[in-house]
Each structure stands twice: as structure tokens, then as C-alpha cells.
Amino acid sequence: MNCSKRVSSMQASPIRKLVPYATKAKQNGIKVYHLNIGQPDIKTPDGFYDVVKNFNEEVLAYATSEGMPELLEALQAYYKTYDMNFEKDELLITNGGSEALLFTMMAVCDPGDNILVAEPFYTNYNGFAQCVNVEINPVTTKAEEGFHLPSKDVVLSKVNDKTRAILLSNPGNPTGTVYTKEEIEMIAEIAKEKNLWIIADEVYREFVYDGLEYTSFGNIESVQDRVVIIDSVSKRYSACGARIGSIACKNKELIAQILKLCQGRLCVPTLEQLGAAELYKTPVSYFKEVNDEYKRRRDVLYNELMKVDGVICEKPTGAFYILAKLPVENAEDFVIWMLEEYNKDGETVMVTPAEGFYATPGLGKDEVRLAYIFKEEDLLKAAKTLADGLKKYMEIKK
Amino acid sequence: MNCSKRVSSMQASPIRKLVPYATKAKQNGIKVYHLNIGQPDIKTPDGFYDVVKNFNEEVLAYATSEGMPELLEALQAYYKTYDMNFEKDELLITNGGSEALLFTMMAVCDPGDNILVAEPFYTNYNGFAQCVNVEINPVTTKAEEGFHLPSKDVVLSKVNDKTRAILLSNPGNPTGTVYTKEEIEMIAEIAKEKNLWIIADEVYREFVYDGLEYTSFGNIESVQDRVVIIDSVSKRYSACGARIGSIACKNKELIAQILKLCQGRLCVPTLEQLGAAELYKTPVSYFKEVNDEYKRRRDVLYNELMKVDGVICEKPTGAFYILAKLPVENAEDFVIWMLEEYNKDGETVMVTPAEGFYATPGLGKDEVRLAYIFKEEDLLKAAKTLADGLKKYMEIKK
């Protein structure tokens, strides 16, 4: 029995495929610090659980396909605090940011079309695109330049007659890069000149450090007919397991088309939507506290990495990832070595090889992504262990 | 800004597109009995809510992509009661039966491939197929024959070199037809002869009346390498809002491929999975009670329909739908007339025109789907109102 080419040719998740090595290390009694996954340890706000636990209907019925009014209203109010004014029929609730991205790709691309994406990018963009026969058209960014965008000419040179959209995650996963206002405006100009959609993955919108200015595509007036904003409660409120995402777009025709996809899958879970509505009412002070925490963690991890000769990365200013170039030939070999051969006082560290975050073959081979999602004390231990392991590995490979 | 052809060409949900007429009737003070939607009024078993309300983790974290062990085990045990023995790595948990169907289509078909489907069929099959550029290849069944399958030769004549699978909902939605063992075996033979996958949508497995024998594709030994079973808690446990579905398949390669799609969207909601695990532990006596209730409802609705001259349908033996041929030229006009022009003592009835359940143009124009999802007393009133309206409509159109 044959499977389709579109799924057969998909790569396995680079974030998950080395998990068996970690499992084996643990079976051998080694403690593994997981810097490889973006699962935050921050407490989910109580409001979510309160609402879910007070649910009192006898029948757990379908919700409306576009999303429940409670959640749509809360999302509307949330956007208003950022000066983005969406009507209720300009919003759709989805099964996580994942479904929001998949549906948006389906709605703007036919098979063979492509989407411009700044690489390295969130690896699952690849999967969403491939399963609907859309191509990722990568615009390469570099560790040495803090993963900021190349010039307008370089970006323009990548646009071809099958290009339908530009997809940008801001702040970037896996780079932690916060794009400048000038970069956002450049992309907006290109989109207008080339008549492209802009898919703005802004799920890390609040995770911006060092007092940096953040520019959302939702605030660039001239492209509001072509901007699709993807959001999610997963990282924003540490509610990854709720799987509540959303699409916001002032182009009502696009929303009407995506609504057909939403109607096809009937609805998003009722309880999770009610809980998410409460999350979106969380006071802004919550983000301040969480940001302070993540900023401290970033500094701890970054400072330890910088103590190793040959590690290249600018200090990231957003999200909770560091993408670093290591002085190794093959980062995957190093990650496996850390799990199979190395430990310091019975402890080791797992990170993610970055090759899978690139579409251009050969790129990212010497890079890894690290997520700073632990409490400072543990993170410091993990960072020191990683730095020590890296030094030892370099000595062996010399 | 242009949307993709694949979404632009999708039809709006035939189940939902007439809702504005119902809304207007209600605004005019008319009570509308909704026989148009499959939302049961049966109480969701307490176990679901108990588990959700006792959830006690501080962080609502991602679950594993394939599904949580608690739910996979409960599902395994459920299948065992039907003599179907699935390993845990032969099961995947999905966002409703909807995602299970979408992922299965992606995994067995490339763009341009087709899937054989007995029509009339669950209308969202159309949407899932279209958004991934797969074609529905319809095998027509008829009201006069109780929507049973045509001969093997007729089915075989529809298979072409782009056909990858046969998709059958058993019991059928919208037909309520329970296929005989002979029909199931015929499909199995065709699948073997033509090397096709069998996608068995068995979400209504327990809703079989009149002591009829039910044959699952999961019990046909000779095709276990090619059968993909789609299930859901929505109708089975009246938990439509939980959005928990599943894929079961003994072809581990197919499961491995679909797992990549599952990993792409990370996971299904944690709380809903824990709740669904409890649902699958519901004692079998629950189904007996629920079935008795639905059987009574079916009889009430069927008997009233049969009192109208010219209505054609065999008594359905499964699910909770009746698909009836009406003595009208255009069922959609009749449905709209019932909402706009008709009422009996301030009450009217909404049903679903069946044209959208067919892929062959022109078919189903004089048919409607009715869902018997109310308590007997209300259903009787609704059925009598519908019958009265139909008679009046026929007089006017004479």
C-alpha cells in the first residue's frame, strides 16, 4: 500500500526526531536538561481553569464554526490595546496557531504556488506547506547579522510569478529576532508592489526585551487588505495544551473563504474557547512579570554561551530562543554526542540541531536552537554543562 | 487580493447556509424546530466533566502528538470489545473525526487523485477533499433501494487509475443506512483487486436499530493492511464540543506518515483527551439506553413522514438521520418556504436540502435530510408540522 508523495516526502520533526537518544540517556541514569523544546514552565493563569471548572451545561455541544462570541469579544478587546480594531467578522478561532497557518496557506495558495519565508523559520511551516503542496521560498538570514532581513533588492529577487505571500514570524522562532520598523515597512512595500499577502505570525508579540520597539503588521495601515495575523494563547499565556489560535484579517473576503474551511471541521473545542476567553482578559501586568523572568533567563544562557570561543550569535531580543552557530562541523553529531557520550556529574543537555529550520540545503548544519524555558538556577546549570560539553567536544574533534 | 482556487470553488456548508432564513423566522416570533443539524440532546456522560474538573496541573502543557497514553489505552480497550486489536502505535488521536478524515486524505492522495464515495455522503467530505485537491468519485445510491450499494460491477466501473481509496460511512450519514455484511465484503474485495485503501468512517457504529447485524471493516481480516478506521466521541457519547477523533490502522507505515502531520500541529487539547479517555470507559449499557431512545424517535419521525403521499424512503436502520425524497421539484425552495411563508400555530420546521450531499450534479434536488435529535414529544410536534407544511406546499404548487 502506497502513501501519498506529499506526506512521504515530509521530513520528520527535527525537534522530536532525536528524542530516542534522550530517552536512552535517561535509561542510563543521566539527567537531561531539555533546552530543545518550547514548552514554558510558567503557570497558566487561573482564569482558564476557573471557567472550565465552572462549566455547567449537560450537553457538551458544538460551538459556532467561526469561534464562540465570548472568545471573539475577548480577542477583539485584546487587539484594541494594540490599536488594532477588528470587527467580529474579521476574526476566526482555530485549533492552535497551527490550524490558523494551515488554513491560511490553503486559502492563499494553490498547489505549486510558493510563500516567501525568512529562513531559518519555525520548522512546522515546512510541514503545513508540504501537505497542501505549497512551496517554501526561503530568504536567507544570518547569525552574524542577528538574523535580520537582507536588503529590499535581495528579498525582491526571490519573488516569482508563483509567489502568493510573505510569511514572517515576529519575534522570530527559532531566531529570537525582533524585526525593526524599517524591516516591517520594507516587507509591506514589497507586498504592495508584488501584490502579495502578508502572513504575520505574531504569537510571541509580547516577548520583546531590552525596551525594544515592536511593530506589528496590524499597525501598518497601507496593507490592511492583505495582512493576515496569526495568534495563539500557547506561549502568550503558557497554555500550549489548550490549542487555541486565531486568524485576524480586515480582508473580509479572505475570512469568508477560510470560514468555509472552519465550517468543514465544524468547530474548536467549547471548553478551551471559554478558558481562552478568560486568558485574553489577563491584566497586562502579567506580561511584565513574565518578560522580566524570560529576560533574566536569556541573559543567563547567552552569557554562558559567549564564554565558549567560536560560538556566534547576537543577543536575541524576543521570543524565548537562541539560535547559535557552534564551532562544530555537524551540530546533529554534537547533539547526539552530548546524549550518548557526555555527562558532567550525571547530567547532560539536549538542544535542537538547526538544519531543519532551513529550506536551503546545507544551511544551518553548524547551528542549534536553545529554548530558555527553565528557572534561572536550573538554566545556569544546563548552560554551564552545555558550554563544558562543547569545549570537550571541540578538543576531541581537533 | 485573490484567494486560492481550491477554497474559492468550495461550496458553503449546505447544512448552515440557510440558517439566515431560520434566524429571520425567529425574529418574526416563529418557533423553529431544527431537524437540520446533528447536534444530539443526550447528556454527555459525567465522567468527562469529572476528569476535566479534577485536572490539577499548574501548566497546561502540550500533550504528545500521537495522543495521550490514557486516551490511547481507553481506545484500545474500547476496540477490544469489538474484537479489534490495535497496538498503541496503530492509533492516533485527532481534532475530531474531521481532522482524522483530512489527514487520511492527505496521506493517501496526491493532488488529482480521487476517492470513491457512496453518494449521498456526509457533505464535509467534499470540503476536506477540495482543500487538499483530491476529487470525490461518487457511486450513486438511491432512496428507492434504501441507499444500499449497487452491484460490484457498477462500483468497479467507477474505479480509474487515479483512484486511491474507497470511503464509506457506516451507518451512513445522511442516509441512516447500515450496510450488510455482503456489501462490506464486496467493498473489501474491490479494494484488494484494485489495490485501494478503505477509509471506514464508523463514528455511528453503535447507532444500529432493529437488532440488525453490524459489520465493521475492522473485522474483515483480509484487508487489515489497507483499512483506516475513523472514529469520534462526538455522536457516540454526545460530546460534539470535545472535538476528539481518532485514526486506527494496522498498516504501521500509514500511521507513521500521518504521525508527521500530527507532529506538525503539535497536539490535540490535553483536557479534552483526558475527558475522552473517561468517555471510552462508559459502560455498554449506556448505548442500549441511548439506542432505545433514538429508535423511538426514528419511528415517530418516519411514521409521520409516511403519512404524506409521495414521500419516498425506506425506514433507516442506523445513525440518527432520515434522507427522504419529497414530492416537490426543488427541496431547497420548500425548505425556504417553510421558513418564510409557513407556520402552524406559530411553529415551523427546518430541514436540510440534500443536494449538497451529492457530488453528481442534479441529484438530490428533491430530497431532504432530517435529524431525529429531539425528545419524542417535541419531535412528534415537529414531524406533524413538517407533514402539514409539505401537504400545503404541494397544494399550492399543484
Image: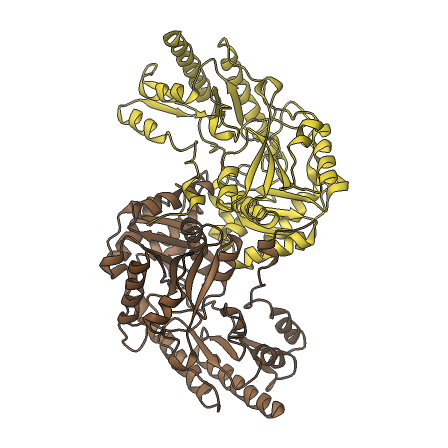
Chain colours: A brown, B yellow
- Foreground residue among A108 and A203: A108
Give the percent coordinates (x, y) of residue B209.
Answer: 62, 25
Is any atom of residue B82 visible in this view?
no
Give the percent coordinates (x, y) of residue B161.
Answer: 65, 41
Give the percent coordinates (x, y) of residue B259.
Answer: 59, 56
Quadrant in the picture for residue A28: bottom right
- Foreground residue among A255 and A157: A157
Give the percent coordinates (x, y) of residue B251.
Answer: 70, 50
Is any atom of residue B392 visible in this view?
yes
- Foreground residue among A229 and B369: A229
- Foreground residue among A59 and B397: B397
Q: Residue at x 56, y 42 (%)?
A: B232
Q: Residue at x 57, y 86 (%)?
A: A389
Please determine whether, in this image, residue B221 is positioned above or below residue B332: below
Please determine whether, in this image, residue B397 is positioned above or below residue A48: above
**Left or right: B339 with respect to B327?**
left
**Left or right: A363 with respect to B226?**
left
| Quadrant of the drawing holding the C terminus of chain B | top left
Q: Residue at x 56, y 68 (%)?
A: A14
Please determine whether, in this image, residue A45 is positioned above or below residue A339: above
